[in-house]
Amino acid sequence: MMASIQVFDPAMCCSTGVCGPSVDPKLVRFAADLEWVKNQGVNVLRFNLSQQPADFVADADVKAALEVSVEESLPLVKVEGKVKSKGRYPSRAELAEWAGLAIPEPGIYSDAVAELVAIGAAIASNCEPCFKYHFDRARKLGVSNEDMLSAVATAKAVKETPAASILSLAERLLATKGPVPVGTRRFAPVASEACCGGSAPANSGACC
């Protein structure tokens, strides 16, 4: 029978790490680690102090820890009813060991890599505050300017590719060798794929 893991989170809007104004790499990493553990057959229960306070009071170990210090006690992780960690999110290797699973090979998705991903996402979404926030976090983690520039260059290429593609399509379909009289077509009706999937008839006039 597989182990059962309980996670008691501090008060927050959600446990994914991506619902606030900025991405929290630690929460994103831990959410992925818990999903991995669940996929191995482990029963995982997660409680949020702001949404499920009764569960914190009902658990004697958690209640006792909170009476000492909320900040030092949460997040709190229990495995098979025993407290395994307090005040931090454990690693995937720790979760695996506690749950009796084979310890996985170390991944490459570190906090520094998470910040590079966030920098790329900020560029792609044109979010100036996001870029400043994650630039500062990456710098504090020791990420070099060269690595951040690489992340920016990659995001720029990904961002500009669809723009270049649609412009190329427009230029190709609208190409003509001379002035076009008012009221005439530049090109014959073209059967195309609808923007939302499927096939749109040649003279439909609507993308969907």
Image (cartoon, rainbow, N blue to C red):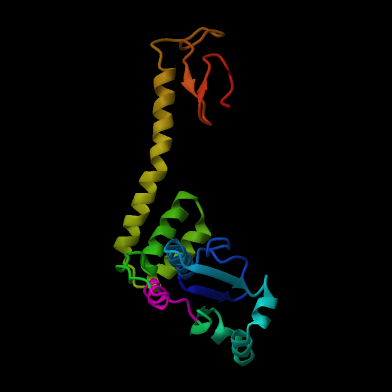
The residue at 50%/51% (across/down) is 126
Is 38 displayed left or right of 66 in the figure? Answer: left
Q: Nearer the viewer, residue 54 or 192?
A: 54
Asked whether 93 falls inside the magenta stretch, the response is yes
Q: Give the x, y percent position of residue 196.
A: 53, 31
Asked whether 151 falls inside the magenta stretch, the response is no
Q: Quadrant of the N terminus?
A: bottom left
Q: Give the x, y percent position of residue 180.
A: 48, 9
Q: Is residue 163 above or below residue 150?
A: above
Q: In this view, does 124 lie above or below 188?
A: below
Q: Which of 100 and 25 is in front in this view?
A: 100
Q: Give the x, y percent position of residue 130.
A: 50, 60
The residue at 68%/76% (across/down) is 53
Q: Give the x, y percent position of residue 91.
A: 40, 74
- Residue projecting furthest to the front: 1
The residue at 42%/30% (across/down) is 167
Q: In this view, does 172 lie above or below 167?
A: above
Segment tinted magenta in the rendering: 88-100
- Location of residue 112 by image quarter: bottom left
- Location of residue 67 by image quarter: bottom right
Q: Nearer the viewer, residue 206 or 6?
A: 6
Q: Quadrant of the C terminus?
A: top right
The residue at 56%/70% (across/down) is 45
